[in-house]
């Protein structure tokens, strides 16, 4: 923004943002106001807008801007202006308290964020309580500030650092009793005022969440009793009920370390157990919101007392009434209720699996059996449901989560026992179709965990399923097909079932609604029963030839081809070439037809369907080749490829060169073709690289970089190919570097960064000296330094792996003949770039990268250190000296002792993980 705009212009922009009927006008206003918010003028303009109070929209924009500026641009203000900003904000919230709740919230956040970044504002809680607690009209905004203040302590928007954060938490703990006293006074003053009770509970929950309330003090506090009174009352309004539930859940979460919070834990335990009657009343009234709230509380109770439930079941705080409450909830007809408790059941199963105590398993088995029974009932479709089960709607996703949970808990019940019990309900009774389908669904979830060896029940089930009449409900047939797919191990052990199973699945394959699960089941059987399926290969080939005549979605068709390729790999070697040619030619013929079509005739010429099919064939045709034998796919890739596949692929690439999606699929197909036979695809190398480079000059599709890395991986150790691969690298680098030089180039093109550094890494791994002696290396290192700060998981991981592997070539004595040469070249790099590497990596860790990237950074630091520890010590010391020691608000970010401790921890580390731990602790000081 060139200069400070006048207030009238700002008003017009805000009005346009909210009221302009033209969407483009709104968009222009939004962009301009965003620019204003990022400018230094935003401070003064926001203050003026809040003083004038012309309307709700302008005040909301100003309050939001103030909050945003304090969060992200606090460094713009001189320290001596902080006090006047505080006074101004407090004045604004006082005068605007009745205008709109959202404005009050934004100003409360601004005040809280200011307090956290302003060390000179000592005892801010005490100041606020003394100033506003005696005025009933000010209580609502005071409670709002005191609610958001603890929430903002761990906000990712504020980088106040661990030292300041510890200081704040200590300060808030000191004043916590003042806040609790204020909340009790507030309740007394407001009586039954619903809004004030909600604010009180929200504030209390916020302080519980921060973990600063004294648990002994709270155990006998009237607020705790009030919470349970509100939750026990049948007439409690929904919003108040939700606020009280949230607060109890926060209190339970806050005392997870039970041994240190036993008095409060006991009170909460006993309080929650009193809510069972209230739950039943909510069920009777069909008040689903309250039912969900109670289930949340019961689940949080079980999560908090999990250790006690497992270590002392049936005693004291391990009382099994906690599980009974969850099973009562599991009996509710709405599946959303039981779903709330899933995480607890996962954790319980995990604990019991680790302990592996049969006595303990016996105690919990009846509870898990009851849960599984309830889950099977919840998985039932409606009796009037038509068609097959949906996988993608909410209920379909719930069933998938049930399937996962059943797999995790089945060890407690015994998969065989459970499978037999489920089957007996179908065999001995005559249940309605929806019960049958749900039972088959649960059986499919556990089928793979049942031992298939000499198991008559499994064979009886399989036999019964394939004999199901076509007249049964389509959903039952659908789920029975899924069950057959899960029982492929049984088919493998009992090959006499293969023919009837395939016949059953082929019927499904021809039917629109059953084709997809049938294809998946055939794929599973091909994968597990490869040797038995070899005799059926001609049938699979026939399916592949007429794939488009089946009503299959693309991914199911690809799955069928995957199964076919897996079986193909088990044929005699002499047959594989011929059959692979046959499989590929079907797809190549289809691609040729598409290429000959006129795209203007309205018929789709999208080749991705056939490219994906070719790719899956190459990917999964992996025959076992003994030493000295010729790879059976080599002939196909060489002769067939050069004559048919490559020309078609080349033409497809040229025709769709501007379409990233299609080019990506072409590259993927070529990647698997190259991987299929490795160096046997050498004849493709020259034409492929030439076309890649030509297209990439015009269209920078990052998949070409990835394909280049595959070529380097396969051919990089062949001396005759190295110069050609280096030429390819240099040709690809020129347009890539130009692309990344644009404003925010690295941030806007993370896929390019990811694939580019994968390519560099392959050179380091396969022919390091070729890269280390090349002219492009200087630019590669400069971009590596720049990209270390890129906050993108995959891209940053690739950059760090490149740097780690690069330095490692000078440490690892893998290739004896040129180790000293490599070591000398790496020394030269570190002499020139070492300080830059360390400073940039440290800066990235402290200010740019999320914590999950630190293990990758630690590996780079470790490699540099073990290459030359004395030099590294000096470089690290210099880098640490350049870090800021204070925040813009004057708070100490890092002390001299913390700097020296970190330096010592890193430089004396004997393992990489010690460097990582030191980095984790140190970077918290800047977050």
Image (cartoon, rainbow, N blue to C red):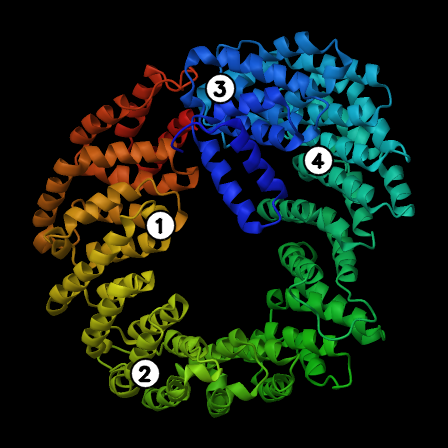
Q: CA distance from mark 1 to mark 2?
A: 32 Å
Q: What residue lies at 58% left-to-right and 18% top-to-bottom?
A: 89
* Disc on the earlier residue, 3 or 2: 3
Nearest-to-viewer mark from 4 and 3: 3
Mark 4 lies on a secondary structure that is loop
Q: Which residue is mark 2?
A: 648
- The answer to whether residue 154 shows anywhere in this view is no
Q: Which residue is mark 1?
A: 795
Quadrant of the drawing holding the C terminus: top left
Residue 56 is situated, as x and y percent measured from the top left of the image, at 66, 30
* Disc on the earlier residue, 2 or 4: 4
- The answer to whether residue 659 shows anywhere in this view is yes
Residue 386 is situated, as x and y percent measured from the top left of the image, at 77, 74
Q: Which residue is mark 3?
A: 117
Q: What residue lies at 19% left-to-right and 60% top-to-bottom?
A: 729
Q: Which mark is residue 312?
A: 4
* Disc on the earlier residue, 3 or 1: 3
């Amino acid at each position: 923004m060139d200069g400070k705009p006048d207030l009238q212009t700002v008003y017009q922009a805000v009005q346009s943002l909210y009221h302009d009927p033209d969407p483009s006008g709104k968009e222009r206003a939004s962009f301009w106001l965003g620019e204003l918010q990022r400018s230094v003028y935003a401070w003064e303009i926001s203050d003026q807008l809040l003083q004038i109070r012309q309307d709700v929209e302008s005040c909301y924009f100003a309050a939001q801007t103030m909050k945003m500026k304090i969060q992200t641009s606090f460094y713009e203000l001189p320290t001596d202006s902080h006090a006047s900003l505080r006074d101004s904000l407090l004045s604004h919230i006082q005068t605007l308290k009745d205008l709109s709740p959202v404005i009050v919230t934004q100003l409360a956040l601004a005040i809280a964020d200011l307090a956290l970044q302003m060390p000179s504002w000592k005892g801010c809680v005490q100041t606020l309580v003394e100033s506003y607690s005696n005025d009933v009209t000010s209580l609502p905004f005071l409670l709002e500030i005191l609610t958001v203040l603890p929430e903002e302590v761990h906000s990712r928007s504020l980088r106040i650092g661990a030292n300041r954060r510890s200081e704040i938490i200590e300060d808030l703990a000191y004043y916590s009793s003042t806040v609790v006293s204020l909340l009790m006074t507030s309740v007394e003053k407001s009586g039954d005022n619903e809004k004030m009770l909600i604010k009180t509970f929200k504030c209390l929950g916020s302080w519980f969440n921060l973990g600063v309330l004294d648990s002994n003090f709270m155990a006998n506090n009237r607020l705790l009793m009030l919470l349970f009174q509100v939750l026990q009352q049948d007439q409690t309004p929904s919003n108040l009920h939700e606020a009280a539930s949230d607060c109890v859940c926060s209190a339970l979460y806050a005392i997870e370390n039970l041994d240190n919070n036993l008095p409060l834990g006991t009170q909460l335990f006993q309080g929650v157990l009193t809510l069972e009657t209230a739950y039943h009343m909510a069920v009777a009234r069909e008040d689903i919101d309250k039912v969900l709230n109670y289930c949340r509380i019961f689940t949080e109770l079980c999560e908090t007392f999990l250790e006690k439930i497992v270590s002392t079941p049936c005693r004291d705080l391990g009382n099994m009434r906690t599980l009974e409450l969850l099973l009562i909830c599991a009996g509710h007809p709405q599946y959303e209720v039981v779903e709330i408790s899933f995480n607890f059941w996962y954790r319980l199963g995990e604990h019991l699996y680790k302990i592996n105590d049969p006595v303990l398993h016996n105690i919990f088995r009846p509870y898990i059996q009851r849960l599984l029974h309830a889950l099977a009932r919840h998985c039932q479709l409606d009796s009037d449901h038509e068609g097959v089960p949906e996988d993608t709607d909410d209920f379909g996703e719930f069933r998938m989560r049930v399937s996962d949970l059943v797999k995790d808990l089945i060890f407690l019940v015994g998969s065989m026992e459970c499978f037999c019990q489920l089957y007996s309900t179908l065999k001995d009774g005559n249940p309605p179709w929806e019960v049958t389908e749900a039972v088959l669904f649960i059986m499919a979830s556990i089928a793979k965990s049942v031992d298939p060896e000499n198991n008559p029940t499994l064979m009886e089930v399989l036999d019964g399923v394939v004999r199901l009449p076509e007249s049964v409900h389509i959903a039952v047939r659908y789920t029975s097909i899924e069950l057959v797919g899960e029982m492929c191990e049984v088919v493998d052990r009992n090959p006499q079932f293969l023919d009837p199973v395939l016949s059953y699945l082929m019927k499904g394959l021809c039917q629109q609604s059953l084709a997809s699960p049938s294809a998946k089941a055939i794929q599973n059987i091909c994968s597990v029963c490869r040797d038995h399926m070899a005799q059926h290969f001609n049938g699979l080939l026939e399916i592949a030839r007429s794939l488009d005549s089946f009503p299959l979605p693309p991914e199911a068709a690809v799955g069928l081809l995957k199964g076919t390729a897996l079986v193909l790999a088990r044929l005699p070697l002499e047959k594989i070439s011929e059959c692979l040619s046959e499989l590929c030619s079907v797809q190549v013929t289809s691609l040729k037809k598409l290429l000959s079509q006129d795209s203007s005739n309205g018929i789709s010429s999208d080749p991705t369907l056939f490219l994906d099919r070719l790719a899956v064939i190459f990917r999964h045709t992996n025959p076992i080749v003994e030493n000295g034998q010729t790879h059976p796919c080599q002939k196909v890739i060489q002769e067939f490829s050069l004559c048919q596949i490559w020309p078609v692929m080349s033409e497809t690439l040229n025709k769709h060169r501007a379409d990233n999606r299609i080019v990506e699929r072409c590259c993927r197909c070529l990647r698997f073709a190259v991987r299929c036979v490795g160096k046997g695809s050498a004849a493709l190398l020259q034409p492929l690289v030439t076309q890649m480079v030509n297209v990439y000059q015009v269209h920078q599709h990052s998949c070409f970089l990835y394909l280049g890395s595959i070529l380097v991986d396969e051919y990089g150790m062949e001396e005759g190919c190295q110069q050609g691969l280096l030429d390819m690298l240099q040709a690809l680098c020129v347009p890539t570097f130009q692309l990344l030089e644009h404003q925010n180039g690295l941030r806007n093109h993370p896929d390019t960064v990811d694939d580019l550094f994968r390519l560099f890494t392959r050179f380091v791994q396969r022919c390091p000296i070729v890269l280390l002696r090349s002219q492009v290396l200087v630019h590669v290192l400069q971009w590596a330094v720049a990209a270390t700060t890129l906050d993108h998981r995959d891209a940053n991981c690739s950059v760090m792996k490149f740097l780690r592997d690069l330095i490692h070539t000078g440490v690892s004595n893998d290739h004896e003949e040129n180790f000293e040469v490599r070591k000398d070249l790496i020394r030269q790099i570190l002499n020139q770039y070492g300080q830059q590497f360390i400073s940039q990596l440290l800066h990235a860790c402290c200010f740019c990268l999320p914590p999950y990237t630190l293990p990758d950074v630690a590996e780079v630091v470790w490699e540099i250190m073990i290459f030359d520890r004395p030099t590294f010590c000096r470089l690290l010391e210099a880098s640490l000296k350049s870090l800021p020691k204070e925040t813009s608000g004057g708070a100490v970010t890092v002390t001299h002792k913390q700097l020296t401790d970190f330096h010592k921890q890193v430089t004396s580390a004997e393992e990489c993980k010690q460097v990582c731990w030191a980095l984790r602790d140190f970077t918290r000081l800047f977050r």
